[in-house]
Amino acid sequence: MKRRQLLKSGILAGAGWTILRSGMLRGADAPSNKLNIAMFGTWGRADAHFGVMGRENIVALCDINEEHLAPAAKRYPNAKTYADWRKCLEQKDINAVVICTTDHTHAFIANWALNRGMHVYCEKPLGNSVEEARVVRANYLKRKDKLATQLGTQRHEIENFARVKELVRDGAIGELKAAYAWGDRQIRRAGYLPAEGEPPKHINYDLWIGPSPMHPYNSKYFSGGPGMNCLSWNMFWDFGSGQVGDMGSHTMDLAWNALDAELPTSAEAEGEKFNPEVSPVELHTSWDIPANDWRPAIRLHWYQGGMMPEPPPGGIDLRRIDHGAMFKGSLGYIVAGFDSRVIIPYGRGANMTYYQPRAKEKLIPPMGGFQNEWLNACKGSLKTTCNFDYGGKMTEVMLLGLVAYRVFPEFLPNEVQEATPAKDAKQKKQQGTPIYRANKKLEYDPAAGKVTNCDQANPLLKRKYREGWTLDG
């Protein structure tokens, strides 16, 4: 019987069954209460998901590396196996996907899966360009009443994220003035790796390259252990966005979660000398974030590679927090890592008598497990904390900062030589890395997704794909 007929018949009403919006049946022994999941990527980050997702029905496995695919297929012998994610998505019984592939394919698989009515969990970042983040986010928003999504910023489940947000929202440092996030990772590369013979037979290198421009095979793209292999390729422009898309996604999440922010109206950048093949190590980007109903317009900052914001008064050493966030208010500062936070009152009136901590029953409740939240959403609630609206906007902001960094070196090379060294980069210059500030602040139209004061910037909002690859398939 069809879902509508079942509802009319009343057969299920007295049997303790519930029909969810997804069309699934929930009951003690309901076989359809389990999702049919396709795993894209069967190694590395996928290892963090198999335990939880394995409680569902894993019906498809996809990986370009046969040596990674084989152990997963042995673990789930009833799952069909694929090398090409496009073919995998045509399997008719899939209703949810988990994406653990290379960054430059995230937006493709996510968007194609949404087009086929599938719930999507995608490892960060959501895309490798501003356009990709916008396309996937818009596609999700059209389907938000039917599909559940989650961006894989799994540190968000740490309860400290909620406590930091409560402090900022409840006025522990007065009126919010600015927010900062940073990461200290420093992995330097000169450029794309040189050719190193033919790929081994167990690696489908053409599918690994996917929509990106072709680069010759080198085994070092595949070095590193599970969960860390991304550090072998994600700093190259055609494959990733460096620390911005990697730990930047996690660390900016600590700040973004507290701001209730919409998209910015500007972007500005300074950093090391531009390399057309490799994303920067030293980088500082910033954005103008519009006001909302509880705070004024603020400036949001991202720092990486050793560049850091000015510390609060009193000699606080921010460098001891390798990935952290700071909020500046009219009456003090909040400094936070993933697991800890501290309030630093500052200035006249900063006596904390104005601040009343929340009662226990009014605290933001725990997520109850990052992946579990998504699984429950797929089965009915559709509510996730880091859905593609929230995560898509955060990804767009971070990638827009890279556009502000790239635009002048790429299109106006003479101006790079004349760029004024950043005033706040004195320490980095002493360490031997010159820092350059772009000569122009980009003005951004968040509704249209376009830069309005620099025509050269708009092509950098997109990526060029190899022939035969489409983002919206």
Image: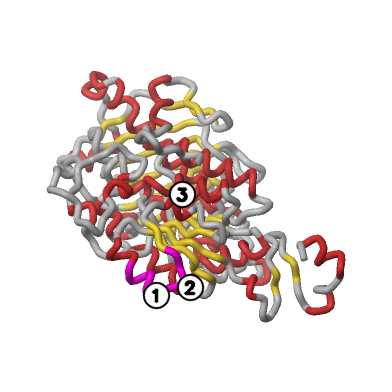
Is residue 72 a member of the stretch shown in magenta?
yes
What type is the residue that disc 3 sits on? Ile
Q: Earlier in the sequence, mark 3 or mark 1?
A: 1
Q: CA distance from mark 3 to mark 1?
A: 24 Å
Q: Which residues are magenta?
A: 70-80
For mark 1, what is the residue?
75
Between residues 293 and 152, which one lies in front from this camera angle?
A: 152
Q: CA distance from mark 3 to mark 2?
A: 21 Å
Front label number (2 vs 1): 1
Using the rendered view, name the quadrant where residue 293 is placed.
top right
Between residues 151 and 336, which one lies in front from this camera angle?
A: 151
Is residue 71 a member of the stretch shown in magenta?
yes
Tell me, for residue 109, which label it has, or none. 3
Q: Quadrant of the N terminus?
A: bottom right
Q: Earlier in the sequence, mark 2 or mark 1?
A: 2
- Picture coordinates of residue 253, whole percent (x, y): 47, 53
- Vertical placement of residue 301 versus 363, above or below: above
